[in-house]
Amino acid sequence: LSRRSFLGTTGAAMVGAAVSMSSVEALAAGGKQGPLNLVEKIFEAHRVGGELKTGKMIALKVDQVMNHDINGMAWLEFEAIGLDTVKVPFAISFVDHNMLQTDYMNPDDHIFMQTAAAKFGAHFSRPGNGVCHQVHLERFAAPGKIYFGTDSHTPTAGGMGMIAIGVGGLDVAAMFAGMPFEFNMPKVVQIKLTGNLQRPYVTAMDVILTILQKLSVKGGVGKIIEYSGPGVANLTLTERATITNMGAELGATTSIFPSDEQTRKFLKAQGREKEWKALAADPGAQYDQTIEIDLSKLEPMIALPWSPDKVVPIRTVAGKKVNQVCIGSCTNSSYGMMKTVATMLKGNTVDEMVSLLINPGSRQVYSMLAKDGSVADMIQSGARMLESGCGPCIGMGAAPGSGQVSVRSYNRNFKGRSGTKDAQVYLASPISCAAMALKGEIIDPRDAGIKVPMVAEPAQYLINDSMIVKPKKDRSKIKIVRGPNIKPLPVKEALRDTIAATTLLKVGDNITTDAIMPSGAKVLPLRMNIPKISEHVFESVDKTFASRAMALKDKGGSIIVGGDNYGQGSSREHAALAPMYLGVQAVIAKNIARIHNSNLINFGILPLMFKSDEDYKRVAQGDELVIRNVIKNVKGSQTYEVENKTQGYTFTVVSKLNVREQEIMV
Ligand code: MIC
Ligand code: SF4
């Protein structure tokens, strides 16, 4: 293993931890008797170590792995591991996020990604081919498989009856290298669906918005959501994918649907019927919790600014003027839904105060809409067509004006994510969005007086994989192209035995990775340039954070104090990597969101939890804290005494690292 980068410590530890785990732990033990739920079935078929038991460590063989262009770093990390080829059955890189080409930076990233994928034997989905989750669902997802990606919405593929989980880039680099994935088995929650949706006005988006209203952005933490019940059969595969996509907003590890005739129908229409198999929970399977939802009772819903769980029925907030509407993204881009929108727009005109932007999630859907005339109907109505990519969802173009109201069929509306800090971003179904674009105000689509057709998914999709570059057999002459935007990985220091650092920032509950490390057109092109991107850490919360942290970097460094669900939202590893670069030693929070927690560990920042709310309340920004015997405690009691030198008292915090994480940490 190379010692050139932080992987010298972290990567080596990851490899070591994985190898020791899979050879030491005997497979014979740890199985489960009796009826299995769907998650357990797929886990058991992939288990290479550990136990199939809630809260216990389990190691899984991985079938498919992906990264995308804002986590191109995963290739730098893979390089540092020192292998010349990926060792996982299927690997793919997508370019879909960083699509604006206003200078050399993003195109440098694209060519780096393409040549790295080619060199190491991965597939490459070219810019313009679509958003990773939509494309993966169409062309690669298959029932029963296990799939990991550097993106929190990887669970979109759970609609296909597979396990699909979002993780950090370094985890993906390890999986590119063929390592199993090890984690603590989450709880499995059953959501039992009954009844039928009141189509066309009530959609899959309204299902998941309703679930978000009930469970909140913390409701899925530490859980996998398994859908079942008589209501499932009537949901199409693409509707299921909308629901599993936004399971990420619940904080769930992933969400999954059974594989049935709907699944077969979709795969057949994609020319992949051979990949189908039926999969469902055994009768009598056990769950940690069961929630029932009657689909017939749902109505059109909307999430208010600035959290996807601030959900209310649309009719309760009707009448507010709308300035921008965005339809598409990885959440709601099925052909059927897009064609429905086109038919609503046909012969009508978008309100003169509304800018309507449409980004179909994949080139497949876009081409089909172009062929059948839907794109012309959209353009004629006054819509602005964007390319198949993330676009406005991640603030890459189309930022709303100051204080403007933007309604989107997307999955996230965190403050500032649109590119405009005070823009009021709402989330609703594509049908609700189209009605609002025409009426110029927030309106329940049932009250808009617009005909909404029922457009079914087609029996045959338009298949053309020419923008997915397959790996070549002879890769010896391929050179990885590194433009000036591709900077080497920063070096990670070893974990200190005594952390004596300043509480540089204290924040409240539900702080998102968007707040820690913003996205948007100015920041995203810096993803391969850690010193530069680090200047933007926490800029919307505290403009001086980065410079104050840099000043303390050589004087003991800093500590961040967080509330509940710290680091919720995305898989953004830069939300850990950039703080590491700025000298952050530890995060002490009430609790830390799953992917962010592992990103912190991967980049050597110690994730610690308060034992009482009182301790959280008492510690103040600016306090000097000292934590001793860190190394011993990481591998031992995982309990740490923290001396607050400024206020003169001591409190206790804990870490919850599994064996593998302990090895990575020290
Ligand atoms: C997002 O939707 O926030 C992103 C951009 O797709 C992220 C990925 C990232 O920031 O690295 C995600 O969801 O994980
Ligand atoms: Fe792209 Fe938005 Fe989907 Fe993230 S949530 S993958 S930014 S479309």
Image: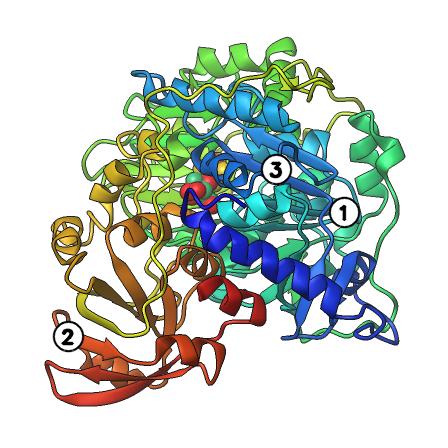
Instruction: Locate residue 506 relative to residue 484 in the image: left or right.
Output: left
Relative to 22, does residue 437 appear above or below in the rendering?
A: above
Mark 2, residue position: 624
The residue shown at (28%, 49%) is: 581
Q: Which label's residue is closer to the chain start, 1 or 2? A: 1
The residue carrying pointer 1 sits among few (fewer than 14), some (14 to 19) or many (20 or more) residues within 10 Å by Cα, namely many
Indicate left or right for 323 with 75 as reference: left
Q: Position of residue 125 (x, y in %)?
A: 59, 23
Query: Disc 1 to disc 3, how far (Cα)?
Result: 25 Å
Residue placed at 31% from the left, 83% from the top? Answer: 613
Q: Amino acid at mark 2?
A: Glu
- Residue that label 1 marks: 145
The image quadrant of residue 84 is: top right
Q: Residue at 44% of width from left, 30% of height from top?
A: 97
The span from disc 3 to disc 2 (Cα, nearest Å) is 43 Å
* Quarter residue 564 falls in: bottom left
Looking at numbered disc 1 in the image, what kind of residue is underneath it? Lys
> Which one is in front in this view, the residue at disc 3 or the one at disc 2?
3
Q: Give the crowd class for mark 2: few <14, some 14-19, many >=20 residues within 10 Å.
A: many
Marks 3 and 2, the one that precedes in the sequence: 3
Front position in the image: 105 or 19? 19
Badge 1 or badge 3: first in the primary sequence: 3
Residue with the mark numbered 3: 83
**Place of residue 530 in the rendered image (x, y in percent of width and height, measured from the top left):** 31, 39
- Which secondary structure, mark 2? strand
